[in-house]
Image: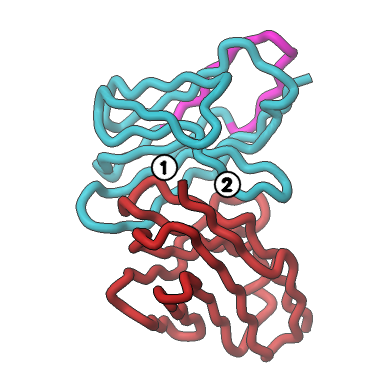
């Protein structure tokens, strides 16, 4: 049971380039999330999804887009990367019923130069 | 929206001592309060959680207390060990999903 898998683990982009971060979960969780983690800022919610085909904005959505075409996958896209998007990105998933903690992936360290 | 504040930002204790991390939240409708431990280079991992109908919960050396009136909750780690060294995050949620996290506490346990 792999849990939540994020690819890639590391990436360096040039300003203006685009990329997609992939998150896959094998726990049949309904809810999925993308957070970014910056020093001294904790974890901030970018976008989330409460089911296949749905997405919603979180606290810091600007500059990012997401898609949830399949229940097990949640993609985070950067159309035109900026240095301010240098961060560690975490994907997480959770059950839909009741209140349950997240299962996090191991993160993607992105540097935009 | 919900605002979660966490203190202290860094905490150093000697092995065997207790550690306490405190969080406050702003939305009185919040009803779910998990705590996460993040080791270097890894994703956060859920260590304990508490729901609003419970005042205290224990799991071996860790415990969480909740005071809904004062809108604060705390993590208590007893008999600390070097492997407890990590960054700890509190979080709160109104909906049960879309967690709002505190900024984290870096705990160092020295032998």
Q: Secondary structure at mark 1?
A: strand
The red chain is B
Can residue A1 be seen from the camera position used here?
no
In the figure, residue A63 lies in which quadrant? top right
Name the quarter where the C terminus of chain A is drawn.
top right
- Residues packed near mark 2 inside 10 Å, few (<14), some (14 to 19) or many (20 plus): many
Separation (CA) of disc 2 from disc 1? 17 Å
- Give the chain letter for cyan: A
**Residue at position x 34%, y 27% from top?**
A55
Q: Is residue B72 above or below residue A55?
A: below
Residue A29 seen? yes
**Residue A67, numbered circle:** none
Magenta-colored span: A9-23
Please tell me which residue lies in front, B94 or A69: B94
For mark 1, what is the residue?
A4
Q: Position of residue A69 (x, y in %)?
A: 29, 20
Look at mark 2 in the image and give the residue it sits on: A43
Residue A48 or residue B26, whichever sits in front: B26
The answer to whether B97 appears left or right of B80 in the picture is: left
Residue A12 drawn in magenta: yes
Check the residue under mark 2 and report the chain it is in.
A
């Amino acid at each position: 049971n792999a849990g939540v898998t994020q690819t890639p683990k590391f990436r360096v982009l040039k300003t203006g380039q685009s990329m997609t971060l992939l998150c896959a979960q094998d726990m049949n969780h309904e809810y999925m999330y993308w957070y970014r983690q910056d020093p001294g800022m904790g974890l901030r919610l970018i976008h989330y999804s409460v089911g296949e085909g749905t997405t919603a904005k979180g606290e810091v959505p600007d500059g990012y887009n997401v898609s949830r075409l399949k229940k097990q996958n949640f993609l985070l896209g950067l159309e035109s990367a900026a240095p301010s998007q240098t961060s560690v990105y975490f994907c997480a998933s959770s059950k839909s019923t009741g209140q349950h903690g997240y299962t996090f992936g191991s993160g993607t360290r992105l540097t935009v130069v | 929206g919900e605002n979660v504040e966490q203190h202290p930002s860094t905490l150093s204790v000697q092995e065997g001592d207790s550690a306490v991390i405190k969080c406050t939240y702003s939305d009185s409708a919040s009803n779910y309060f998990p705590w996460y431990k993040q080791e270097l280079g890894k994703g956060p991992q859920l260590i304990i959680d508490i729901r609003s109908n419970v005042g205290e919960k224990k799991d071996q050396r860790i415990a969480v207390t909740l005071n809904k009136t004062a809108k604060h909750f705390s993590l208590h780690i007893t008999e600390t060990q070097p492997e407890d060294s990590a960054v700890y995050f509190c979080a709160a949620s109104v909906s049960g999903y879309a967690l709002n996290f505190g900024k984290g506490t870096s705990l160092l346990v020295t032998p």
